[in-house]
Every structure is written in structure tokens, then in C-alpha cells.
Amino acid sequence: MKLEVRNYDLDTSEPTVLLHEDDCHTMAVSEGDRVRIAGESAAIAIVSISDTLVRKGTALIPPSVQKASGASVGSFAEVTLSHTPESVRHIRAKMDGGCLSAESIAQLVDDVVAGRLSRIETSAWLTALYIKGMDTDEIAAYAKAMAETGERISFPGRQVFDFHSFGGLPGNKVTPIVVSIVAAAGLAIPKLSSRAISSACGTADFVETFCRTDLDSEEVRRITDEVGGVFSWTGATDLGPAGDRFITVQRPLGIDPRPQLLASIMSKKVAVGATDLVMDIPMGTESKVPTLEEARSYARDLMDLGDRLGIRVECIITYAEQPLGEAVGPVLEARECMEVLECLPGHEDVADKACICAGTILGMGGICDGTEKAREILESGIAHDKFLEIVAAQGGKPDVSSKNMVPGRFSKDVLSDRPGFVRRLSNKAVVAVAKAAGAPADRGAGVVLGKKLGMKVSKGDVLMTIYAERKDKLAHAVETARDMRPVEVEGMVISRVCQK
Amino acid sequence: MKLEVRNYDLDTSEPTVLLHEDDCHTMAVSEGDRVRIAGESAAIAIVSISDTLVRKGTALIPPSVQKASGASVGSFAEVTLSHTPESVRHIRAKMDGGCLSAESIAQLVDDVVAGRLSRIETSAWLTALYIKGMDTDEIAAYAKAMAETGERISFPGRQVFDFHSFGGLPGNKVTPIVVSIVAAAGLAIPKLSSRAISSACGTADFVETFCRTDLDSEEVRRITDEVGGVFSWTGATDLGPAGDRFITVQRPLGIDPRPQLLASIMSKKVAVGATDLVMDIPMGTESKVPTLEEARSYARDLMDLGDRLGIRVECIITYAEQPLGEAVGPVLEARECMEVLECLPGHEDVADKACICAGTILGMGGICDGTEKAREILESGIAHDKFLEIVAAQGGKPDVSSKNMVPGRFSKDVLSDRPGFVRRLSNKAVVAVAKAAGAPADRGAGVVLGKKLGMKVSKGDVLMTIYAERKDKLAHAVETARDMRPVEVEGMVISRVCQK
């Protein structure tokens, strides 16, 4: 039926339209149904029903749907019950354990990006993927389809390097160091990172404390051409936007279905034009990949996927039983990252990991003794120069230094109540404390570890310092630390066995 | 943080709250997160974010959540990021193929009913159930938990009979006939039915054309005590409300996970206090249960479930290759149902099925030769008297007759373009035509079949008559009939095999 379009100023992750109960009754439309809204063009939206918020004979339509349907406020649009998209059949086929064709997968991805699938359906899809999985051909088709939904960058005739860490390792601040070393060696590395999803700080979260991370695709291409690399935020580019669409549904479920994870990673690499990729797979009891067997299986899958997508992939399985370096939280990680680039003492584990990752890339680029070369570039200060050059290209201060990185003004030391050794350092607990302190939204919030695994501790030693921008959050974080005990100290004697 | 409560006049199936972007940033809350809203009491809601619809420092809260949280408009409520409910872990356990304890299942059902699970999570749960299933103990626990979420009826010391049809059979109008026969025989049968979900007409849809179906639990109990039975609508009673909560999520997915189906049915029977249940399982190519094997397997499951829930269950597998009787659609089905009760000629299949179902119940109630007895009660007019008595008790006209049931004023005959025999009569296509005509929302809309399976047809014979309340819907239904050809007529020769 023809309904007058009025503005509905609520843009949620799924396109909605608010209709009057009586009109819905006439159209035999129920809450959650899909309708087609035809103005100058046409779009699909999911129905919410109210008998008070909306007047009979009108449709409240959010701006994104007004645009897609060409139905402007004040005009009349034809609203009709719409068929369920074909993809819902593909979702059911996956539930039944079927293997999907590349065409079906492409159609599903299209429907997700166009907002034709509701969150209910997307959730069913992710759950089915989690339970039933996908074979490598399906994942490759999935990655390709996701890449094709957005922009693509290309660097004709050039080898293009990329680097990706699987995540799950707090304090993993190596990306700007790796990019700086690789770019300094003359190779192209347009590196895009994500923000924190469930962690305390993603790469984009700490990089944006000292330069822009909202480069669009054209800027990524241009700066990579001019200075060799970028460290920017995926979200600003519209490269492989499909992956992001799934995140809002995945997050509340707390699942990361393997095919989704792999396809989502690889789609970004395809979209950015990468020809060579180094994958860092952090392995640790509390990380995404707890065992060597699983790490190897991911590595095999990624290499197989690379084959099908025309990307050479090498994988590095790395140690992730405790945070990398000492700092967790945006400003704190930025500071530590710069300290490594400035060749200040400390954080050897960060420097070491960065050099190995960068070195592997150099090796793929035909440079002998890659890791040695990477270390040379880092220690000579050439990497630091390149870092400042990229920061400047990304709109940051060209002379930014670790000294400029000032954490939140409220802080509290957590002291050890006993002597002993650090026996356990929980990644999850450290993240929980940093988040309680306000990270990543409060940039100055986070944690600096005073002691790491195996280190000797005296009573009263600082185990960690918590920083926050607000007093109440500091108190909350201290309480979290008290509850979760991220750093456990024990003596050498675990228990005594006595005769009765 | 403290936010001023303002009214958000949109009540969707999941409790929502609309917050300002900046406030969300401060609280580190994202779209789709759960927050706790504490006024005089506290409730959980799912966050939507806007930076225009809602003013900073305020929270738009729908009336249902205002009520649950005790946060009235104009007051200040404490809004805080809320933990993910425990049930999300149970959902993941089911995804991983785990078997859930009765406690876990009860917790999940509680969270669903209280609106603590989002549609995304509910969808994941249903998908996991669809793929991974449940064993009989889990289903029994699920049914019990659902029954316990709402009201319960009891008839102390009495045998209480119930009757349930699995659905998927258009025109299945036997319920008021069965209830009338059983009540006339002196047994108690508080029968509650549902409305159409995807069909053209549920039992409640056609019964409400001649009497109230919105009896509350107390009325159901009282009328059953007084006249022996009711035929009312489940939805009005708050018996086992959990089942209904799942429907809004299930419907768009087009799935009906077996454990969900079984638990949902049995929960209503537990809640209504049934001690003896007859299950009608319509079997047909296009029904929910296409093969005898599946029908038997459902029957076994239902009887096992009954054992665990203290309900004696008998199952009848019935023929469902074509609609029952001739009429599909609210007023049309009501008319046909009454014609059978009034002992008018025709609709022998309807009468036969009703007598068998009622007869099985009589048998369980200790009455010998149940089916014969049922037929006697029907043919003697005693069932009709009881029917009118129940109709009156449910607020209908005490002298209602099939003649009062007048279908929509627009109608069109669909004629056969050839002579032959009815070779196929598609339930799905008949339903599609009736829905296109406006059923069940337009009560006078629907279809009356002129010919049924196997019948001889001359060119020009009426295959079906379509009724509608609106001219445009009639046209739409005629078009649907033309496309889908619900009644297929062919000669006796299917194909000729000739020598070359």
C-alpha cells in the first residue's frame, strides 16, 4: 500500500521501518517481516510495529533506507510484503550440513551487505558456520565475495606485503614497528588494522593517539606509494565491509566461527591488493589458539586459502602465555611502541617479535637474512625515521616521541603481598583490569606490568600499575585486580606432603 | 551513569533502550550490548544508539522496560553495562554439542521470558537446537521449564483430557467438534489452540468468528468445570508464554527445531493440567511430517516425553495429502465446522476424523467403543447442543448457525480448462491462494475446493471458489491460483511411448 514517508531518526545495524498496527494488519505484515519500500528506487527493510509512535497511513523510515529506496520525506512510497531472500535457503542448507556453491555464498554476502538479512538470520548463519564449518573452497569463495562487496586497492606490477596477527594477545603493539622496518627496506606494506572488539586495545586504538587512522582507500594507496607503508584503520576504508557487518552479531554471541574468521581476514588482504602475507598466530592457554596442533592447523588452512586466492602466505606461531611487553591500553601501548622504535632500553620481547615478523616479510621480498636485516634497520634508527615519516603522512606530529604519550592522571600500584615468583600471568585478567580502568575508550587508561612470568618478587614489589582518566574507573579497576589477581606470586614450594 | 528517563514509545519483541552516542562512549557500551537500568527495581535492555533522536544525558526507555525497571519518565535511572547472562554459555555449550542440565535449561528459559536474551542470541539457540537436537530428558526439562514460566491450571482429582494436532494440514477444523463430543460424554477438555503462524487459518482464527477466544486461565478453568470444555486461544492465557517468545525468532528463519516443537507443545499441556493427551500427527508430502517413519518417530518421542511429564499420550497418524474438508479460511472453516455439527450432508472426512480423535479420547476415559460412541454423540445432535452451550459460555450467540457464517463479498470461481481427474492437490498452494485472498487477517477470505483428489472433472467444472473482502486481494489470489495451480487435472494417460 501507499504510505507517506516520514523521517525515523534511528539507524541501527539492520534497516528498519516503523509501521502502524492497522496498516500492518491490512498488509498482513507482522513484526520482523521484511517489506519492500519503493520510492524512486527500492529497498528492503525489517518491520517494527507501533500504534502510537507512527500515524496510520505513514511509514517512519530511517535516512539510510530513505536513500536506498529513493523515498524522500513527504513523498508516498509503495510498501509491500517482501519475499524472504534466497540466502535464507542457503542458511538452512548450511544448517543441514550442505556445502555451498560460490554463487550461493556470493548471494548471501550481498544480502548481508545490502541489509536484506535480519540479525536473526545473520545469527543463524554464524551459528551454522560455527557448528558445521566450511571447506577450503567455500572459505575462499566467502573471502572473495566479501572482498568484492567493497572498494579494492591495487598496486599494478608491484609485490605488496601485508602482515596480520590473529589477535588474543594483549599488548601486541608490533604493527607500527613491523611496518616501519619493512617500508624502510623499500617494500610496500599498506597495513590496515582493526579496533578492539573484546580486547582492551586494538592496533587502531593506540595508533590513533598519535596520528590519523581514518585514511580512506585512496589515501592508503597514495601514502603507501609515497613513503612505503601505512598503519591505519580498516574501518575507514570500505575494504571488505561485509566482515564488519557480521561483527555486531558475532560479538554478543561470543563466538568466532573459524570459516568466518579466516574469510574475514583474507577478504581484507584480497581487497588491499596483497601478494605476500605474513600471519602471526599467537599461541597460549588463554589466546584464540591454545595448542600447537591448532596453530598448525590454522597455518595450513591459511596457506591453502592463500593458494586459492593468489596470495603467498607464511605463518609464524608466537608465544602468547603473557602480554607482549609491559603496557596494555592505548596511550601506554603507543608509548612502549615508540620506546622500542627510539631504541630505549627494555621491552626486548616486543623488539624481538617485531624483528622476526618484519624479517620474514623481508625474506619473502628477496632480502637475505631478513631477521638480521630487520634488526639492523631497527637498531640503526632508520626504522624510527621511517616511522616518523609515516606518522607525518598520516597527519601526526613529525617529531612525536614516547615522551608525549601521557597516560591517565589517576594511577595506583598493585603491590605483592608476599615474596616468591610470578607463576601465572593471566591475559584475560589483565585485559579485564585495563577495560575496567576505561580502555580502550579512555585512551589514557590501562595497565603497566611491573613483573612478568618467572620473575622474582619481593613483598611490596609493584606487580602492576593501573592508569585511568577517571577516579571511579580507577577504583573499579583496582577492585577487578583484587578479584581476578592477574599476576599470581607463589613460593617455590607448591605444597608439603607430610606423614600422618 | 545516571540518565534521565524519557519515554520511548516502541515496544519490540526484545526490550530496548535508546542512548546517546557520547554517553555510550563514556560507558564503553556498543550497539547491541546489554545494559542494566536501575530505577526502583532493575531490568535489562539491549542498547540502540543515536546521536539525534536522544539527548545526551537521557535514556529513551519503552513502557515495558520502564515498568520492569521501576524507572518512571522524568526520574533518573542508573544505567550500567551489564554482564552477558549465564545462558549465553549454555547456548554455546549446545553449539558444541553438549547435553544441558535441567538447571541450565530452566535458566535459559527464564532469561528468554524475562527478555534478557537478545534476538541474536535466541536465534543462535534455535539454530543450535535445530542442528544438534536434544535428548528426551532435555526436552522434558525444557517443557517443564516453559510450563513453569507462566500460569498453571489444575483440576484437582479429575482426569483432564487434551487434544493436539501437529499442524500443517489446511482446513483442519475438527477441534470444536472433538471438544463438543468429548464434553458431551462428560469428560473435561480445556482445549487451547493457536492462531495461524504461517498457515491461512489456525483454530483460534476461525473460532473467534463466532465466540470469544480470549479467555484467561481462570475462565478456562471455570467454563471447563461448568460445561465440560472450551475451545479458546492459548495466547490469552499466559500458559507457557516462553513458547510464544521463540516464535518471533523462529518464523523468519523458517525452521521448527524438533526439540522446540515438542517442548513447546508439551509445556502447554503441562500448564493446562492435562493428564491424558491425544496427538494428531497429519502425515503428507507437504506437511510437517512427510513419511510414516517420521510420524512414528514423533509418536514415540511424544509418548516418552509424556512418561517423563506424567501425561498419558496416544498418537493418531492421519492422512494429510490434501486439505481436510473443502474450506480454508476463518469464516469458511467456521461454517463447515458448524455444518458437520448440524449433521448437514457433506464433509464426511471432517466428521470421520473428528469422531476418531474424540473416540480415542473417550477410550482413554474408560468409555468402550469410543469411536462408535463419538459418532453416536455427533449424529444424535448431542454434540451440537454441547457446542452451542460452550459457544454461549465463551460469549457467543447461543443459537449461532452455519447460516450466519457469511464469507467475503467478492468471489471468483476457478474453472478447469480440461476434463480429467484431480491428480494433485497441493496443500501449500491452497494456503498460498487463501493467504493472497487475505486470510487469516480478513476473516471472510479463503478458498472452498470444488473438487478433491481423485475426483472426475469435466471441462468448465469449478475447481475452487476464492472469497475475499477486498477486490484487489481477490485479483491477487486469482493470480496466485493461476501461477501455482493448486488443483491439477490430468487425463488417465500420463504419457505415450511410441515406436520411432
Image: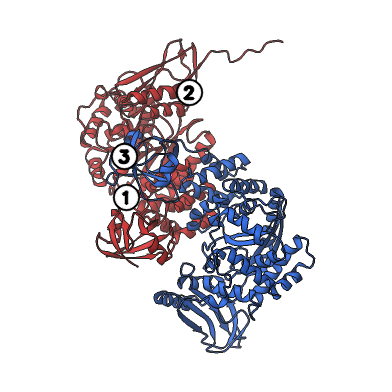
Chain colours: A red, B blue
At label 3, which amino acid type do we have? Thr
Instruction: Say the numbered circle drawn on residue A483.
Output: 2
Front label number (2 vs 1): 1
Residue A159 visible to an observer of this rendering: no
What's the CA distance linking mark 2 and mark 3? 32 Å
Instruction: Look at the picture and state if A208 lies above or below A46.
Output: above
Which mark, residue A129? none
Residue marked by disc 1: A10
Badge 3: residue crowd in 10 Å (few <14, some 14–19, many ≥20) = some
Residue A349 found in image quarter: top left
Secondary element at image label 1 = loop
**Foreground residue, B287 or B201?**
B201
Q: The N terminus of chain A is located in which quarter?
A: bottom left
User: In the image, is B144 to the left or to the right of B466?
Assistant: right
Task: Write the residue at 31% across / 56% down.
Answer: A61
Q: Where is residue B295 in the image (x, y as percent from the top left)?
A: 67, 62
